[in-house]
Image (cartoon, rainbow, N blue to C red):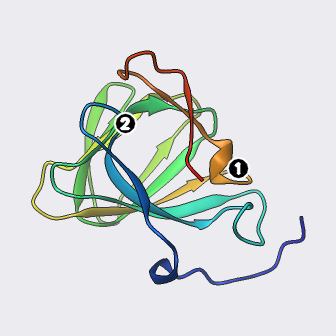
C-alpha cells in the first residue's frame, strides 16, 4: 500500500455504531484512519461517542488499544477494575485485556481510539457477556 499524508475531518466521515442494550452496547463512532478507507497503513484511529446511559460491553481483542478522552466523563473497566476517566485522560488497553466503558453522567463522552492495525476490520471483538459470543468482525 502506498501511504500519503492526509487530514481527516470527522464532519466528513459517516457515523457507525451499535444500538444493542442487551448486547455489544450503545455507542457511535467514526473511523478516521483505516487502511481500507484511507491512504495509510499500520494504524487505525477514530472518534467514538458514548451518550449518557450508553456503554460499550465488556470485550477483548488481540491488538492493544489507546483511548484519549476529549470530552465528558466515563467509567472504563479494565480487567475488572473501574476507573473514572475524564477529558484529558489516556487509557492503555493491553492485548486481550477485558475492558468496557459506560457513561453514567449527563453529558456525552467522546474519546479518540487507536489500534496498531492496518484497518478497523482487522480487529475481532470477543464480547464477554453476549450469548454465544465468538469473534465478532468489526463493521467496515
Q: Nearer the viewer, mark 2 or mark 1?
A: 2
Q: Secondary structure at mark 1?
A: loop
**Mark 2, residue position:** 24
Q: Which mark is residue 100?
A: none
**Mark 1, residue position:** 117
Indicate left or right for 136 with 78 as reference. right
Indicate left or right for 90 with 8 as reference. left
Residue 36: x and y in percent read 73, 60
Q: Secondary structure at mark 2?
A: loop
Q: Tell me where residue 17 sits by quadrant.
A: bottom left
Count of numbered tags? 2
Please tell me which residue lies in front, 24 or 85. 24
Indicate left or right for 11 with 107 as reference. right
Residue located 52% across and 64% down the image: 46
**The N terminus lies in which quarter of the figure?**
bottom right
Residue 34: x and y in percent read 67, 62
Q: Is residue 8 above or below residue 70?
A: below
Residue located 76% across and 56% down the image: 42
What residue occupies the far right of the structure in this picture? 2
Indicate left or right for 63 with 100 as reference. right
Amino acid at each position: 500500500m502506498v501511504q500519503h499524508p492526509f487530514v481527516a475531518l470527522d464532519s466528513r466521515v459517516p457515523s457507525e455504531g451499535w444500538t444493542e442494550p442487551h448486547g455489544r452496547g450503545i455507542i457511535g463512532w467514526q473511523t478516521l484512519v483505516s487502511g481500507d478507507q484511507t491512504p495509510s497503513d499500520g494504524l487505525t484511529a477514530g472518534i467514538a461517542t458514548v451518550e449518557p446511559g450508553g456503554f460499550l460491553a465488556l470485550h477483548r481483542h488481540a491488538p492493544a488499544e489507546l483511548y484519549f478522552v476529549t470530552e465528558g466523563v466515563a467509567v472504563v473497566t479494565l480487567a475488572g477494575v473501574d476507573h473514572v476517566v475524564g477529558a484529558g485522560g489516556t487509557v492503555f488497553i493491553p492485548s486481550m485485556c477485558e475492558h468496557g466503558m459506560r457513561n453514567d453522567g449527563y453529558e456525552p463522552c467522546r474519546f479518540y481510539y487507536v489500534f496498531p492495525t492496518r484497518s478497523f476490520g482487522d480487529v475481532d471483538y470477543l464480547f464477554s457477556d453476549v450469548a454465544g459470543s465468538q469473534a465478532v468482525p468489526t463493521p467496515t
